[in-house]
Image (cartoon, rainbow, N blue to C red):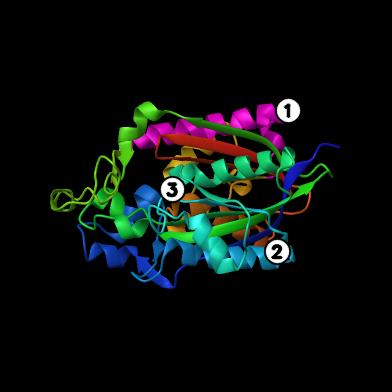
Amino acid sequence: MKTYGKIIGVGSYLPEKVITNDDISKIVDTSDEWIKSRTGICERRLADEKTSTSMLALNAAKAAISDAKIDPKKIDLIIVATCTPDMQFPSTACILQSKLGLNNIPCFDISAACSGFNYAITVANSFIISKQAKTILVVGADTLAKYLDWTDRGTCILFGDGAGAVVMEAANDGSGVLASVLGAEGSGGHLLTFRGGGSIGPMNRVLIDEKEYCIKMKGSEVFKFAVRVLEDGTRLVLKKAKLKIPDINLLIPHQANIRIIDHAIKKLGLSKENVYVNLQKYGNTSAASIPIAIFEAKQEGRIKSGDIVVIVGFGAGLTYGANLIKF
């Protein structure tokens, strides 16, 4: 039987600080009712100034390794999906490797924003299928709240911080990541940006004053893209696996906006009982949103052995991705 990358351990970590909609309404002209009706978000978690992305990743990684019940030294590759690395270099994956006390294994980051975890899972699965690695730690971690303009009602209500992780291992029992789809529409990259710090926006006072060190988004255009690719990505990955919508036990979409999710599942003809949503608690945690949701769905008994789970997301780039996983 063909070898695939099987998820054998899951973990997550959320900062302790909770910011509610009412808290935000004291900063910017909005209200709990306005935010909930437009996004479905009630609260989100924020990392403090001293807490880095790698620190969140470390806690999630330790939880996933513990859940997998393996010796961490079995890990032969670390992939971190993040668009908020600790620094430009070294990679957050290398920093995480050091914090885990592991040495001499390859480590790298993937930058695909909110699609990052889907990209990372696909890459990890490819390493396993090609026998370049046997046991892989995959982490999605972001601290986007550090880069918000708290006067911009269109973005400051959406994002939170967090990390999720999985351990993948080679398996030939018919389970694992059975199909993957990745894509990008770079022509739409200007719709969701964070310029500051890059080679076209190195640090200077003008960019700071113009808030180029903050996330900027054209919400309505991103909304349309998101609804389209959540549906298309799900259908494409099912087709690749030679399965159909009724075969899905659980759909885990990127947790960005409840209206995006509702529009997409309506088009797919899925019932809400077959879709996992936890964005009301955490907001959009970018690359962390799907692995956090996988962890919580397993904790709640929503994912059982043998279940077919589709994870699908979208993000800046504009990027999208989907993976079909048999647990």
User: Callout 1: 10 Å neighbours few (<14), some, many (20+)?
Assistant: few
Task: Tell me which amino acid carries mark 1.
Answer: Lys
The structure residue drawn at horizontal position 35% and vertical position 66%, both measured from the top left corner, is: 20
Q: Is residue 112 above or below residue 276?
A: above
The structure residue drawn at horizontal position 42% and vertical position 60%, both measured from the top left corner, is: 161
Across and down, in percent, residue 146 comes to 32, 60
Q: CA distance from mark 1 to mark 2?
A: 36 Å
- Give the labeled residue for mark 2: 73
- The first of marks 1 and 2 along the sequence is 2
Q: Place residue 21 in its image quadrant.
A: bottom left
Callout 2 secondary element? helix
- Give the labeled residue for mark 1: 242
Q: Is residue 58 left or right of residue 71?
A: left
Callout 3 secondary element? loop
The structure residue drawn at horizontal position 82% and vertical position 41%, both measured from the top left corner, is: 174
Q: Is residue 192 above or below residue 302?
A: above
Q: Is residue 57 above or below residue 264?
A: below
Q: Is residue 164 left or right of residue 71?
A: left
**Which quarter of the rendering shows the N terminus?**
top right
- The first of marks 3 and 1 along the sequence is 1
Task: Tell me which amino acid carries mark 2.
Answer: Lys
Is 233 included in the stretch rendered in magenta? yes
Callout 1 secondary element? loop
Q: CA distance from mark 2 to mark 3?
A: 35 Å
Q: Nearer the viewer, mark 1 or mark 2?
A: 2
Across and down, in percent, residue 99 comes to 54, 68
Contact between labelled residues 1 and 3, with CB atoms less than 8 Å apart: no
Magenta-drawn segment: 220-249
Whether residue 143 is visible to the viewer of this picture, yes or no, is: yes
Task: Tell me which amino acid carries mark 3.
Answer: Ala
- Give the labeled residue for mark 3: 256
